[in-house]
Amino acid sequence: MWFRTPGGDLLLDYIPVLVHFVIVVGLTAALPALHALVGGSRPTPPKMEPYESGVWTIGSTRERVPIRYYLIAMLFILFDIETVFLFPWAVVYRRLGAFGLIEMLVFVGVLGAGLIYAWKRGALEWE
Amino acid sequence: MITVVLVAAVKSVALVVMVLLGFAYATLLERRLLARFQLRYGPNRTGPFGLLQPFADGIKLIFKESFMPATADRLIYWLAPAISMVAALFVYAVIPIGPEIRFFGATVSLYIADVNVGILLVLGASSIGVYGVILGGWSSNNKYALLGCLRSSAQLISYELAIGLAVVSVVLTAGSLSLVDIVNAQQRLWFVALQPVGFLLFFIGALAETNRAPFDLPEAEQELIAGFHTEYGGFKFAMFYVGEYVGIITMSLLVTTLFLGGWHGPLLPGPHWVAVKTFAFMCLFIWIRATMPRVRHDQLMAFGWKVLVPLGLLNVVATAVIVALVGG
């Protein structure tokens, strides 16, 4: 059948998920539309000014961002992907036996070394 | 095929209504409880015990004027709260609130779908929620909002790692990613007993993921006005609020499902146990907010990266070794 994946799993399992998604998106689209309809809008220049404690805005907001945020984002990507790799391993772990354990110890060992390296180089310092 | 869609649609609508009612009363619960912690009464005038207060708030917010800053990025400004709300509500597709029950002679399962990557879907959807915060803060073109969204995204992604690692050790213990299987694996012994470190990691991560005190830096009102939603008013603000409070319910429900045996418990039927445990955790969230002072940003990041992530990795290794020794 067209909806069978090679593993024999039914993609049909995901149809309820899709239905739920459509309903949630529909509701989320309907509420702001209703709000825009009944709320009305009478824009005046002071009202449309960005809020800066009651004074006129000074300078632009779209400025450069401190480099440490990029650093954290890069570290996050590395470690998050690592976590994703651990999920399938965790599911089949009991079937892998000693091989699975050693394999994972090497994997987590490399990552732990990476974390210690980033730590020692000061990537985790915030000052 | 048609039946599958119809059944899913009925369940989905019922669940969304339930979650939104839960959200409405979570706001009231928080205001009332916080007030009592501070020896005040809280809102108690609208209806008996203030029970109509959430509806008064909702109606007020929907009739508020819809304004936006002139320099805001129009499309993204509207998209951000929607992403927040969709991500928060979507995760309920796979979270079970009870086992199969008999309902008018038919067997009904109390979850929309039981897919084999359930918990991964939940983690993925809650990661999408971060986009709501980032885009909302950036598109408002407001300095407070930008600072709030930068802090917030750094915090959310850091603590997501702690949650991910805690979930890996749970999956390792249960041997499945399906939330229904994980609950069934706890029939005899709850995972909080087998995974105490994982439980703590997950709970601390949950506090940070939902921007709750002591990790409520994104909205530190004394320094950042309101953080990433400074420029959001009316119902657009309410949508961020839905995302946040539904997040609290979701996290309480996930703690219940992953660590506290879900619907397993004596005497009461399954769904009641889920409700009781979830409610207890929501009260705990509020209690912690009333008790703990806010941490500094450098303390927050250091705690996430230097304590929680190494602890999570060690916990996964320790779990793997124990599972290998015991033989599952």
Image (cartoon, coloured by chain):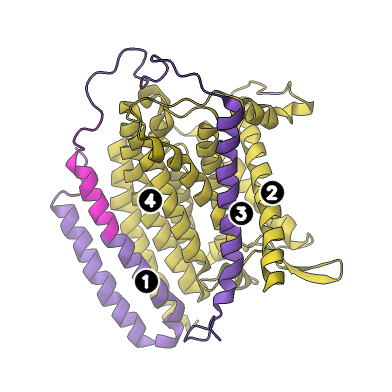
Q: Which amino acid type is shown beneath numbered disc 1? A: Leu
Residue wearing tag 3: A23
Determine the secondary structure under disc 2: helix
Pinpoint the chain carrying mark 4.
B
Q: Is residue A70 magenta?
A: yes
Residue wearing tag 1: A86
Which of pointers 4 and 2 lies earlier in the amino acid sequence?
Answer: 2
Which of pointers 3 and 1 lies earlier in the amino acid sequence?
Answer: 3
Q: Please name which of the two marks, 1 or 2, marks the residue nearer to the observer.
A: 2
Give left or right: position of B37 versus B325. right
Residue wearing tag 4: B159
Residue wearing tag 2: B18
* Label 3, label 4: how far apart the Cα atoms are: 30 Å
Pinpoint the chain carrying mark 1.
A
Residue under disc 4 on the same chain as residue under disc 2: yes
Q: Which amino acid type is shown beneath numbered disc 3? A: Ile
Q: Which residues are magenta?
A: A61-77
Residue at position x 39%, y 14% in the image: A46
B160 or B188: nearer the viewer: B160
Give left or right: position of B202 versus B1. left
